[in-house]
Image: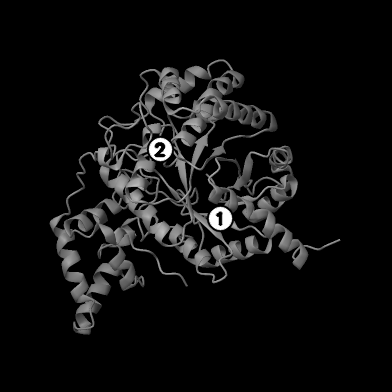
Protein backbone atom coordinates (compact mmCIF):
# COMPACT_ATOMS: atom_id res chain seq x y z
CA UNK A 1 0.00 0.00 0.00
CA UNK A 2 1.39 3.37 -1.02
CA UNK A 3 1.66 6.10 1.56
CA UNK A 4 0.62 9.67 0.87
CA UNK A 5 3.41 11.55 -0.87
CA UNK A 6 5.05 8.53 -2.46
CA UNK A 7 6.32 9.10 -6.02
CA UNK A 8 3.86 6.62 -7.50
CA UNK A 9 0.84 8.26 -5.90
CA UNK A 10 1.96 11.75 -6.82
CA UNK A 11 2.44 10.72 -10.44
CA UNK A 12 -1.04 9.19 -10.57
CA UNK A 13 -2.60 12.32 -9.03
CA UNK A 14 -0.71 14.53 -11.44
CA UNK A 15 -2.12 12.69 -14.43
CA UNK A 16 -5.63 12.69 -13.00
CA UNK A 17 -5.68 16.39 -12.13
CA UNK A 18 -4.25 17.56 -15.45
CA UNK A 19 -7.44 16.54 -17.23
CA UNK A 20 -9.18 19.85 -16.51
CA UNK A 21 -6.46 21.81 -18.29
CA UNK A 22 -6.59 19.36 -21.20
CA UNK A 23 -10.37 19.54 -21.54
CA UNK A 24 -10.36 23.33 -21.46
CA UNK A 25 -7.71 23.41 -24.16
CA UNK A 26 -9.81 21.06 -26.30
CA UNK A 27 -12.67 23.55 -26.29
CA UNK A 28 -15.37 21.18 -25.03
CA UNK A 29 -18.07 22.73 -22.84
CA UNK A 30 -17.46 21.71 -19.22
CA UNK A 31 -19.60 21.38 -16.11
CA UNK A 32 -17.91 21.98 -12.76
CA UNK A 33 -19.60 21.44 -9.40
CA UNK A 34 -18.65 23.74 -6.55
CA UNK A 35 -18.32 22.32 -3.01
CA UNK A 36 -17.40 24.51 -0.05
CA UNK A 37 -14.67 23.87 2.48
CA UNK A 38 -16.62 23.40 5.75
CA UNK A 39 -16.46 25.90 8.63
CA UNK A 40 -14.05 25.21 11.48
CA UNK A 41 -16.93 25.30 13.97
CA UNK A 42 -18.07 21.91 12.59
CA UNK A 43 -16.13 18.64 12.81
CA UNK A 44 -14.47 18.06 9.44
CA UNK A 45 -15.80 14.57 8.67
CA UNK A 46 -19.43 15.23 9.56
CA UNK A 47 -19.44 18.66 7.90
CA UNK A 48 -18.09 17.23 4.65
CA UNK A 49 -20.26 14.10 4.66
CA UNK A 50 -22.80 15.41 2.13
CA UNK A 51 -20.03 16.85 -0.01
CA UNK A 52 -18.23 13.50 -0.04
CA UNK A 53 -21.47 11.74 -0.99
CA UNK A 54 -21.97 14.17 -3.87
CA UNK A 55 -18.38 13.60 -4.95
CA UNK A 56 -18.99 9.83 -5.01
CA UNK A 57 -22.03 10.37 -7.23
CA UNK A 58 -19.92 12.47 -9.59
CA UNK A 59 -17.53 9.58 -10.18
CA UNK A 60 -19.88 8.22 -12.85
CA UNK A 61 -20.73 11.59 -14.44
CA UNK A 62 -18.45 11.80 -17.47
CA UNK A 63 -19.62 15.29 -18.46
CA UNK A 64 -18.60 16.77 -15.09
CA UNK A 65 -15.04 17.92 -15.67
CA UNK A 66 -13.99 18.82 -12.13
CA UNK A 67 -14.96 19.73 -8.59
CA UNK A 68 -14.30 23.34 -7.59
CA UNK A 69 -13.34 23.54 -3.91
CA UNK A 70 -13.84 26.96 -2.30
CA UNK A 71 -11.61 28.57 0.28
CA UNK A 72 -13.03 30.80 3.02
CA UNK A 73 -16.26 31.47 1.16
CA UNK A 74 -18.50 33.75 3.24
CA UNK A 75 -16.61 33.01 6.50
CA UNK A 76 -12.87 33.10 7.07
CA UNK A 77 -12.56 30.34 9.67
CA UNK A 78 -12.86 27.24 7.49
CA UNK A 79 -11.12 23.90 7.27
CA UNK A 80 -8.06 23.53 5.06
CA UNK A 81 -9.29 23.62 1.43
CA UNK A 82 -6.51 21.25 0.33
CA UNK A 83 -7.62 18.68 2.91
CA UNK A 84 -11.19 19.12 1.64
CA UNK A 85 -9.99 18.74 -1.94
CA UNK A 86 -8.11 15.55 -1.09
CA UNK A 87 -11.26 13.88 0.29
CA UNK A 88 -13.38 14.94 -2.69
CA UNK A 89 -10.73 13.94 -5.22
CA UNK A 90 -10.42 10.50 -3.65
CA UNK A 91 -14.21 10.00 -3.57
CA UNK A 92 -14.86 11.17 -7.13
CA UNK A 93 -11.73 10.48 -9.12
CA UNK A 94 -12.28 13.97 -10.57
CA UNK A 95 -9.73 16.75 -11.01
CA UNK A 96 -9.93 19.59 -8.50
CA UNK A 97 -10.10 23.30 -9.20
CA UNK A 98 -8.74 24.61 -5.90
CA UNK A 99 -9.77 28.12 -4.94
CA UNK A 100 -7.14 30.02 -2.96
CA UNK A 101 -8.55 33.06 -1.19
CA UNK A 102 -6.50 36.03 -0.11
CA UNK A 103 -8.90 36.75 2.74
CA UNK A 104 -6.89 36.67 5.98
CA UNK A 105 -3.99 35.27 3.96
CA UNK A 106 -0.37 36.27 3.78
CA UNK A 107 2.59 35.18 1.70
CA UNK A 108 3.28 32.25 4.02
CA UNK A 109 -0.25 30.81 3.87
CA UNK A 110 -0.39 31.19 0.10
CA UNK A 111 2.93 29.35 -0.27
CA UNK A 112 1.80 26.61 2.11
CA UNK A 113 -1.44 26.06 0.20
CA UNK A 114 0.41 25.88 -3.11
CA UNK A 115 2.97 23.45 -1.68
CA UNK A 116 0.23 21.30 -0.15
CA UNK A 117 -1.75 21.32 -3.41
CA UNK A 118 1.36 20.32 -5.30
CA UNK A 119 2.06 17.44 -2.92
CA UNK A 120 -1.41 16.06 -3.64
CA UNK A 121 -1.05 16.50 -7.38
CA UNK A 122 -3.61 19.31 -7.60
CA UNK A 123 -2.60 21.42 -10.57
CA UNK A 124 -5.59 23.69 -11.27
CA UNK A 125 -6.00 26.66 -8.92
CA UNK A 126 -8.17 29.77 -8.94
CA UNK A 127 -6.55 32.85 -7.38
CA UNK A 128 -9.01 35.12 -5.57
CA UNK A 129 -8.57 38.13 -3.33
CA UNK A 130 -11.78 37.27 -1.46
CA UNK A 131 -14.66 39.31 -0.11
CA UNK A 132 -14.75 41.20 3.19
CA UNK A 133 -13.68 39.00 6.08
CA UNK A 134 -16.28 38.46 8.78
CA UNK A 135 -13.38 39.05 11.21
CA UNK A 136 -12.61 42.50 9.78
CA UNK A 137 -13.86 45.17 12.24
CA UNK A 138 -16.36 47.62 10.83
CA UNK A 139 -16.40 51.10 12.33
CA UNK A 140 -19.09 53.61 11.59
CA UNK A 141 -18.53 57.25 10.87
CA UNK A 142 -15.77 59.23 9.27
CA UNK A 143 -12.98 56.85 10.31
CA UNK A 144 -14.39 54.11 8.13
CA UNK A 145 -13.58 50.41 8.64
CA UNK A 146 -10.89 49.46 11.11
CA UNK A 147 -7.55 48.03 10.09
CA UNK A 148 -7.52 44.25 9.69
CA UNK A 149 -4.17 42.88 10.76
CA UNK A 150 -4.51 39.57 8.88
CA UNK A 151 -5.13 41.54 5.70
CA UNK A 152 -5.90 40.43 2.15
CA UNK A 153 -3.34 38.80 -0.10
CA UNK A 154 -4.08 39.91 -3.63
CA UNK A 155 -5.03 37.44 -6.33
CA UNK A 156 -2.21 38.80 -8.47
CA UNK A 157 0.28 37.92 -5.74
CA UNK A 158 -1.12 34.38 -5.63
CA UNK A 159 -0.70 34.20 -9.40
CA UNK A 160 2.83 35.53 -8.99
CA UNK A 161 3.71 32.69 -6.63
CA UNK A 162 2.04 30.02 -8.78
CA UNK A 163 3.31 31.21 -12.15
CA UNK A 164 6.79 31.98 -10.84
CA UNK A 165 7.66 28.28 -10.54
CA UNK A 166 9.88 27.35 -13.44
CA UNK A 167 8.43 23.88 -14.02
CA UNK A 168 4.98 25.19 -14.99
CA UNK A 169 3.24 22.76 -12.63
CA UNK A 170 0.22 24.92 -11.84
CA UNK A 171 -2.64 25.59 -14.22
CA UNK A 172 -3.71 28.92 -12.72
CA UNK A 173 -6.91 30.86 -13.23
CA UNK A 174 -8.33 34.13 -11.95
CA UNK A 175 -11.70 35.72 -11.36
CA UNK A 176 -13.55 38.61 -12.96
CA UNK A 177 -16.83 40.27 -12.10
CA UNK A 178 -18.57 41.28 -15.34
CA UNK A 179 -21.69 42.33 -13.41
CA UNK A 180 -20.74 45.98 -12.98
CA UNK A 181 -23.11 48.79 -13.86
CA UNK A 182 -21.06 51.99 -14.04
CA UNK A 183 -18.10 52.69 -16.34
CA UNK A 184 -15.45 53.02 -13.62
CA UNK A 185 -16.22 49.67 -11.99
CA UNK A 186 -16.58 47.87 -15.31
CA UNK A 187 -13.30 49.10 -16.75
CA UNK A 188 -11.51 48.47 -13.47
CA UNK A 189 -12.66 44.85 -13.63
CA UNK A 190 -11.73 44.37 -17.27
CA UNK A 191 -8.38 46.11 -16.85
CA UNK A 192 -7.51 43.95 -13.86
CA UNK A 193 -8.60 40.84 -15.77
CA UNK A 194 -6.19 41.72 -18.57
CA UNK A 195 -3.47 42.28 -15.95
CA UNK A 196 -4.17 38.85 -14.46
CA UNK A 197 -3.90 37.21 -17.87
CA UNK A 198 -0.65 39.06 -18.55
CA UNK A 199 0.59 37.85 -15.15
CA UNK A 200 0.02 34.17 -15.89
CA UNK A 201 -3.71 33.38 -15.57
CA UNK A 202 -4.55 30.69 -18.13
CA UNK A 203 -8.34 30.78 -17.68
CA UNK A 204 -10.99 33.01 -16.14
CA UNK A 205 -13.96 32.27 -13.85
CA UNK A 206 -16.70 34.89 -13.52
CA UNK A 207 -18.62 35.93 -10.43
CA UNK A 208 -22.15 34.58 -10.24
CA UNK A 209 -25.00 36.55 -11.76
CA UNK A 210 -28.13 36.31 -13.90
CA UNK A 211 -27.65 39.18 -16.35
CA UNK A 212 -26.91 37.40 -19.63
CA UNK A 213 -26.23 40.75 -21.31
CA UNK A 214 -23.23 41.14 -19.04
CA UNK A 215 -22.02 37.64 -19.80
CA UNK A 216 -22.25 38.40 -23.52
CA UNK A 217 -20.55 41.75 -22.95
CA UNK A 218 -17.53 40.00 -21.42
CA UNK A 219 -17.17 37.74 -24.46
CA UNK A 220 -17.38 40.72 -26.80
CA UNK A 221 -14.74 42.56 -24.79
CA UNK A 222 -12.40 39.55 -24.93
CA UNK A 223 -12.95 39.30 -28.70
CA UNK A 224 -12.28 43.02 -29.10
CA UNK A 225 -8.99 42.59 -27.22
CA UNK A 226 -8.18 39.39 -29.14
CA UNK A 227 -8.00 37.32 -25.94
CA UNK A 228 -8.88 33.67 -26.45
CA UNK A 229 -8.45 32.29 -22.91
CA UNK A 230 -11.13 29.85 -21.70
CA UNK A 231 -13.82 31.46 -19.54
CA UNK A 232 -16.06 29.59 -17.10
CA UNK A 233 -19.29 31.22 -15.91
CA UNK A 234 -20.27 30.69 -12.29
CA UNK A 235 -24.01 30.08 -11.89
CA UNK A 236 -25.72 30.06 -8.52
CA UNK A 237 -28.53 28.03 -7.00
CA UNK A 238 -30.05 29.93 -4.08
CA UNK A 239 -31.28 28.20 -0.95
CA UNK A 240 -34.55 29.10 0.77
CA UNK A 241 -32.56 30.83 3.51
CA UNK A 242 -30.66 32.87 0.92
CA UNK A 243 -33.87 33.95 -0.82
CA UNK A 244 -35.66 34.91 2.40
CA UNK A 245 -32.84 37.23 3.44
CA UNK A 246 -32.00 38.78 0.07
CA UNK A 247 -33.49 42.14 1.03
CA UNK A 248 -31.31 42.31 4.15
CA UNK A 249 -28.14 40.57 3.04
CA UNK A 250 -25.69 41.26 0.27
CA UNK A 251 -23.52 38.67 -1.40
CA UNK A 252 -20.47 40.80 -2.23
CA UNK A 253 -20.27 41.21 -5.97
CA UNK A 254 -23.45 39.18 -6.58
CA UNK A 255 -26.28 41.54 -7.45
CA UNK A 256 -29.90 40.50 -7.13
CA UNK A 257 -32.15 43.30 -8.47
CA UNK A 258 -35.19 44.12 -6.39
CA UNK A 259 -37.59 43.00 -9.12
CA UNK A 260 -35.79 39.66 -9.46
CA UNK A 261 -35.73 39.31 -5.65
CA UNK A 262 -39.52 39.57 -5.66
CA UNK A 263 -39.73 36.87 -8.34
CA UNK A 264 -37.48 34.53 -6.34
CA UNK A 265 -39.47 35.11 -3.18
CA UNK A 266 -42.78 34.41 -4.95
CA UNK A 267 -41.28 31.23 -6.37
CA UNK A 268 -40.36 30.09 -2.86
CA UNK A 269 -43.58 31.05 -1.06
CA UNK A 270 -44.77 27.48 -0.59
CA UNK A 271 -41.75 25.25 -0.11
CA UNK A 272 -38.12 24.57 -0.94
CA UNK A 273 -39.33 22.07 -3.53
CA UNK A 274 -41.28 24.81 -5.34
CA UNK A 275 -38.27 27.13 -5.19
CA UNK A 276 -35.97 24.50 -6.68
CA UNK A 277 -38.49 23.62 -9.39
CA UNK A 278 -38.57 27.27 -10.46
CA UNK A 279 -34.80 27.74 -10.38
CA UNK A 280 -33.94 24.60 -12.36
CA UNK A 281 -35.19 25.86 -15.77
CA UNK A 282 -33.31 29.11 -15.22
CA UNK A 283 -30.03 27.33 -14.45
CA UNK A 284 -30.51 25.08 -17.47
CA UNK A 285 -31.15 28.08 -19.71
CA UNK A 286 -28.14 29.88 -18.28
CA UNK A 287 -25.86 26.93 -18.99
CA UNK A 288 -27.13 26.55 -22.55
CA UNK A 289 -26.84 30.30 -23.12
CA UNK A 290 -23.28 30.37 -21.80
CA UNK A 291 -22.25 27.66 -24.25
CA UNK A 292 -23.82 29.55 -27.16
CA UNK A 293 -22.17 32.80 -26.03
CA UNK A 294 -18.74 31.17 -26.19
CA UNK A 295 -18.07 30.13 -22.60
CA UNK A 296 -15.94 27.07 -21.94
CA UNK A 297 -18.18 25.83 -19.16
CA UNK A 298 -20.25 26.60 -16.08
CA UNK A 299 -19.32 26.23 -12.43
CA UNK A 300 -22.50 25.46 -10.50
CA UNK A 301 -22.55 26.79 -6.92
CA UNK A 302 -25.11 26.34 -4.16
CA UNK A 303 -25.84 22.60 -4.48
CA UNK A 304 -26.07 21.14 -0.99
CA UNK A 305 -27.26 17.55 -1.35
CA UNK A 306 -27.03 14.60 -3.78
CA UNK A 307 -30.69 14.75 -4.81
CA UNK A 308 -30.43 18.38 -5.89
CA UNK A 309 -27.20 17.55 -7.68
CA UNK A 310 -28.97 14.91 -9.77
CA UNK A 311 -31.79 17.29 -10.70
CA UNK A 312 -29.43 20.13 -11.63
CA UNK A 313 -27.28 17.91 -13.83
CA UNK A 314 -30.34 16.45 -15.53
CA UNK A 315 -31.74 19.89 -16.27
CA UNK A 316 -28.44 21.21 -17.62
CA UNK A 317 -28.04 18.19 -19.90
CA UNK A 318 -31.57 18.57 -21.22
CA UNK A 319 -31.03 22.28 -21.91
CA UNK A 320 -27.71 21.70 -23.64
CA UNK A 321 -29.39 19.12 -25.89
CA UNK A 322 -32.43 21.35 -26.56
CA UNK A 323 -30.81 24.71 -27.24
CA UNK A 324 -28.31 24.40 -30.05
CA UNK A 325 -29.39 27.61 -31.81
CA UNK A 326 -28.69 31.05 -30.34
CA UNK A 327 -32.02 32.50 -31.53
CA UNK A 328 -33.96 29.53 -30.14
CA UNK A 329 -32.25 29.97 -26.78
CA UNK A 330 -32.75 33.75 -26.80
CA UNK A 331 -36.48 33.41 -27.47
CA UNK A 332 -36.81 30.92 -24.61
CA UNK A 333 -34.78 33.03 -22.18
CA UNK A 334 -36.87 36.11 -22.91
CA UNK A 335 -40.14 34.19 -22.82
CA UNK A 336 -39.26 32.66 -19.44
CA UNK A 337 -38.49 36.04 -17.87
CA UNK A 338 -40.81 38.36 -19.76
CA UNK A 339 -39.94 42.02 -19.22
CA UNK A 340 -37.82 41.31 -16.15
CA UNK A 341 -34.61 43.36 -16.08
CA UNK A 342 -31.56 41.91 -14.40
CA UNK A 343 -29.89 45.32 -14.08
CA UNK A 344 -29.89 46.27 -10.37
CA UNK A 345 -29.83 50.05 -10.93
CA UNK A 346 -31.58 52.51 -13.27
CA UNK A 347 -29.59 53.62 -16.31
CA UNK A 348 -27.29 50.63 -15.98
CA UNK A 349 -24.08 50.86 -17.99
CA UNK A 350 -23.22 48.33 -20.70
CA UNK A 351 -20.00 48.59 -22.70
CA UNK A 352 -21.61 47.65 -26.04
CA UNK A 353 -24.83 48.36 -27.87
CA UNK A 354 -26.95 45.56 -29.29
CA UNK A 355 -26.39 42.94 -26.58
CA UNK A 356 -28.79 39.97 -26.59
CA UNK A 357 -30.12 40.84 -30.00
CA UNK A 358 -31.30 38.17 -32.39
CA UNK A 359 -28.94 36.98 -35.09
CA UNK A 360 -25.41 35.96 -34.21
CA UNK A 361 -23.99 35.95 -30.66
CA UNK A 362 -20.67 37.03 -32.20
CA UNK A 363 -21.19 40.02 -34.53
CA UNK A 364 -18.50 41.17 -36.90
CA UNK A 365 -15.97 43.44 -35.22
CA UNK A 366 -16.94 46.27 -37.56
CA UNK A 367 -20.55 46.14 -36.39
CA UNK A 368 -19.80 46.33 -32.65
CA UNK A 369 -20.60 49.74 -31.21
CA UNK A 370 -19.18 50.98 -27.91
CA UNK A 371 -21.39 53.05 -25.63
CA UNK A 372 -20.15 56.20 -23.93
CA UNK A 373 -17.48 55.90 -21.26
CA UNK A 374 -17.65 58.72 -18.73
CA UNK A 375 -14.99 57.89 -16.16
CA UNK A 376 -14.71 59.91 -12.92
CA UNK A 377 -12.79 63.18 -13.03
CA UNK A 378 -9.69 63.38 -10.85
CA UNK A 379 -9.80 66.00 -8.13
CA UNK A 380 -7.31 68.85 -8.16
CA UNK A 381 -5.69 67.54 -4.97
CA UNK A 382 -5.22 64.07 -6.45
CA UNK A 383 -3.73 65.55 -9.62
CA UNK A 384 -1.32 67.65 -7.56
CA UNK A 385 -0.33 64.72 -5.39
CA UNK A 386 0.20 62.51 -8.43
CA UNK A 387 2.41 65.16 -9.99
CA UNK A 388 4.50 66.11 -6.94
CA UNK A 389 5.13 62.84 -5.12
CA UNK A 390 7.16 61.08 -7.82
CA UNK A 391 9.55 64.03 -7.66
CA UNK A 392 9.56 64.24 -3.84
CA UNK A 393 10.43 60.56 -3.56
CA UNK A 394 13.12 60.57 -6.21
CA UNK A 395 16.81 60.25 -5.34
CA UNK A 396 17.38 63.77 -6.65
CA UNK A 397 15.36 65.38 -3.84
CA UNK A 398 17.05 66.16 -0.49
CA UNK A 399 16.38 63.50 2.09
CA UNK A 400 14.61 65.79 4.54
CA UNK A 401 11.80 66.44 2.03
CA UNK A 402 11.26 62.73 1.52
CA UNK A 403 11.26 62.24 5.27
CA UNK A 404 8.60 64.94 5.69
CA UNK A 405 6.45 63.13 3.17
CA UNK A 406 6.98 59.77 4.87
CA UNK A 407 6.05 61.22 8.25
CA UNK A 408 2.98 63.14 7.08
CA UNK A 409 1.50 60.93 4.38
CA UNK A 410 2.57 57.39 5.17
CA UNK A 411 2.97 57.29 8.92
CA UNK A 412 6.00 55.01 8.64
CA UNK A 413 3.97 52.03 7.44
CA UNK A 414 6.69 50.98 4.99
CA UNK A 415 4.67 51.56 1.81
CA UNK A 416 7.07 51.05 -1.06
CA UNK A 417 7.54 53.38 -3.97
CA UNK A 418 6.33 50.65 -6.31
CA UNK A 419 3.03 50.33 -4.43
CA UNK A 420 2.57 54.07 -4.66
CA UNK A 421 3.35 54.00 -8.38
CA UNK A 422 0.76 51.29 -8.97
CA UNK A 423 -1.91 53.56 -7.45
CA UNK A 424 -0.68 56.72 -9.24
CA UNK A 425 0.75 57.91 -5.91
CA UNK A 426 -2.54 57.77 -4.05
CA UNK A 427 -2.47 56.19 -0.59
CA UNK A 428 -3.65 52.59 -1.02
CA UNK A 429 -4.55 52.45 2.68
CA UNK A 430 -7.75 54.27 1.69
CA UNK A 431 -8.87 50.90 0.34
CA UNK A 432 -10.08 48.92 3.38
CA UNK A 433 -8.42 45.80 1.93
CA UNK A 434 -5.29 47.82 1.13
CA UNK A 435 -5.25 46.52 -2.40
CA UNK A 436 -2.67 47.83 -4.84
CA UNK A 437 -3.16 46.16 -8.22
CA UNK A 438 -6.79 47.05 -8.78
CA UNK A 439 -10.31 46.90 -7.43
CA UNK A 440 -11.88 43.78 -5.97
CA UNK A 441 -15.21 42.56 -7.32
CA UNK A 442 -17.27 43.43 -4.26
CA UNK A 443 -18.36 47.02 -4.88
CA UNK A 444 -22.07 47.80 -5.00
CA UNK A 445 -23.90 48.48 -8.29
CA UNK A 446 -23.64 52.18 -7.47
CA UNK A 447 -19.85 51.94 -7.21
CA UNK A 448 -19.63 52.05 -3.42
CA UNK A 449 -17.10 50.00 -1.46
CA UNK A 450 -18.49 46.80 0.03
CA UNK A 451 -17.39 48.07 3.47
CA UNK A 452 -19.71 51.07 3.54
CA UNK A 453 -20.93 54.19 1.86
CA UNK A 454 -17.67 55.49 0.38
CA UNK A 455 -16.93 55.18 -3.34
CA UNK A 456 -14.43 52.49 -4.26
CA UNK A 457 -10.90 53.84 -3.75
CA UNK A 458 -9.91 52.73 -7.25
CA UNK A 459 -12.36 55.20 -8.79
CA UNK A 460 -9.75 57.80 -7.86
CA UNK A 461 -7.00 55.67 -9.38
CA UNK A 462 -8.77 55.19 -12.71
CA UNK A 463 -9.65 58.91 -12.76
CA UNK A 464 -5.96 59.81 -12.55
CA UNK A 465 -5.04 57.13 -15.09
CA UNK A 466 -7.63 58.56 -17.49
CA UNK A 467 -6.47 62.14 -16.91
CA UNK A 468 -2.92 61.09 -17.78
CA UNK A 469 -3.98 58.98 -20.76
CA UNK A 470 -2.34 56.04 -18.98
CA UNK A 471 -5.16 53.51 -18.63
CA UNK A 472 -2.82 50.86 -20.04
CA UNK A 473 -0.81 51.04 -16.81
CA UNK A 474 -3.76 49.40 -15.03
CA UNK A 475 -3.11 46.32 -17.19
CA UNK A 476 0.62 45.96 -16.51
CA UNK A 477 1.64 42.41 -15.48
CA UNK A 478 3.02 41.67 -12.05
CA UNK A 479 6.52 40.25 -12.26
CA UNK A 480 7.00 36.61 -11.27
CA UNK A 481 9.49 35.57 -8.64
Of circles 2 and 1, the one toward us is 2
Q: Residue at x 74, y 46 (%)?
A: 91
Q: Secondary structure at mark 2?
A: helix
Relative vertical location of residue 123 with respect to residue 246 in this rendering, above or below: below
Which residue carries the number 1 mark?
A: 125
Q: Which label belongs to residue 444?
A: none
Mark 2 or mark 1: whose residue is earlier in sequence? 1
Q: Is residue 371 left or right of residue 83?
A: left
Which percent across, then down, holds residue 84? 67, 50
Farthest residue, direction left: 380
Q: Is residue 127 left or right of residue 461?
A: right
Which percent across, then down, holds residue 239? 56, 29
> Which residue is nearer to you in this view: 145 or 233?
233
Which percent across, then down, holds residue 349? 27, 36
Q: Is residue 35 left or right of residue 463?
A: right
Q: Residue at x 63, y 34 (%)?
A: 304
Relative vertical location of residue 113 with respect to residue 67 in this rendering, above or below: below
Q: Is residue 375 visible?
A: yes
Relative vertical location of residue 376 with respect to residue 357 in this rendering, above or below: below
Q: Quadrant of residue 13?
A: bottom right
What distance separates the C-alpha of mark 2 from that of mark 1? Answer: 22 Å
Q: Is residue 308 left or right of residue 327?
A: right
> Which residue is nearer to you in this view: 373 or 266?
373
Q: Which label belongs to residue 215?
A: 2
Q: Residue at x 74, y 50 (%)?
A: 90
Which percent across, then down, holds residue 289? 46, 31
Q: Secondary structure at mark 1?
A: strand
Amino acid sequence: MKTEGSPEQLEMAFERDSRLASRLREGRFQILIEINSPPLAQPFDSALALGATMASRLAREDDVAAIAVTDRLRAEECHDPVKTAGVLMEASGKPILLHISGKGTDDERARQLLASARSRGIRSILALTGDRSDLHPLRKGIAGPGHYEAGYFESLDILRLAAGRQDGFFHAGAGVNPFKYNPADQYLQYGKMVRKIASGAEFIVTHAGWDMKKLQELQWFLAMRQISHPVIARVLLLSMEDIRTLEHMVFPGVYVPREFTAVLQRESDISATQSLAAQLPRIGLQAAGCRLLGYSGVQVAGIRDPQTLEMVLTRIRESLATYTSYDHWLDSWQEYHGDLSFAPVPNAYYVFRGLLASGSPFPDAASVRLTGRDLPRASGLDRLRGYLLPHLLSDRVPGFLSNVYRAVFRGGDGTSGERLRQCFYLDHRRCPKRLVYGACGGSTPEGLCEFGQRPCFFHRVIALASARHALDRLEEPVAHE
